[in-house]
Image (tube, rainbow, N blue to C red):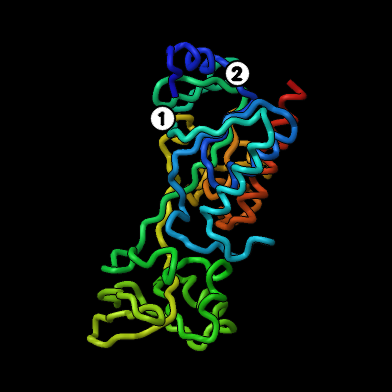
Amino acid sequence: MKSHDGREHKRKDFIVYDAIIIGGGPAGLQAALTLGRMHRRTLLLDSGAYRNGTVRHAHNLLTNDGRDPAELRRLARAEIAAYDTVEIRDAAVSTVEREEDGLIVTIDGGQLRARAVILATGVADELPPIPGLAEHWGDTVANCPFCHGHEFSGRPVAVVNASAHAAALAAMLEPVASEVHVVAPADVRAVSGTDDGLRLELTDGTARDVAGAFVAPTWTVRGEIVDALGLERQESGAVRTDPFGRTSVEGVYAVGDIAQPDHLPGPMFSLAAAIAGGQLAAVAVVQSLVVA
């Protein structure tokens, strides 16, 4: 991000932003839009790593049902570009540190200062170790029936899940699918694609053809920044927040998949919830700047 003479970058590093947003998914982009509309000097840093990076069609989002998530991000960036107090950089963050009068965000090549930081870094999924499963993740293998169930309507699906939630998930899918097969991950030897969906090769030597499969990945917060700041966590592993995304560290907010307020049983993994969280955190940031 250096200028040709090397001086402009240094000057920019010592701008004090009203807010730095870390993460360019729906939560971070909505926070940037809201702050831009309030004419707050804002920087959004986007590493390019997205939880839904393999998803071709996002669903259950009003006016955008079925749109490619990459297209959603492109459209959001284009809208944000209309607000000249918001800057977007494609850059990864290495550290965030609290200092007496604000926060320091370190990226490759320099340090940036802000009065508030909004963490919208998302989570990372670890799928069951079934050969072939990962190749279909985000397409015919999903985890959310609200986001991907309707696309398999009238056809058989599998719930590859041995947890106590498997029966509830199967019951939710019954009005959608023609058949719902609950299979333990340990009973699936391999997964392969077919013209109509997936073939589950089972350990007993049989196979089952389905339109799609729902799995329960193990998710973890991308936690280097969270741990370094010492943010309080929920039992789920998500960052503990209030309803406006405020964390246990003053000036630091968490939104989207990494955040869980006390009144919720877990983080809400949906585009609509992420967008709502980004907006609420941005509102809280603006209010804190007025009070300050």
**The residue under label 2 is which amino acid type?**
Val
- The reply to whether residue 168 is in sight is no
**Which residue type does callout 1 highlight?**
Ser
Numbered marks: total: 2
| Marked residue nearer the N-terminal end (1 or 2) | 2
- In the displayed structure, would residue 223 be above or below residue 146? above
Q: Residue at x 54, y 74 (%)?
A: 149
Residue 94 image label: 1
Quadrant position of the C terminus in the picture: top right
Q: Nearer the viewer, residue 249 or 76?
A: 76
Circle 1: is it few (<14), some (14-19), or many (20+) Cα within 10 Å?
Answer: few
The percent position of residue 35, horizontal first and vertical second, equals 69, 34
Q: Left or right: 75 with respect to 221?
A: right
Q: Residue at x 46, y 71 (%)?
A: 164
The answer to whether residue 39 is seen in the rendering is yes
Task: Read off the residue under disc 2.
Answer: 16
Q: Residues within 10 Å of mark 2 (few under 14, many from 20)?
A: some
Find numbered disc 2 in the image and state the secondary structure of the residue it sits on. Answer: strand
Q: On screen, 167 above or below 58?
A: below
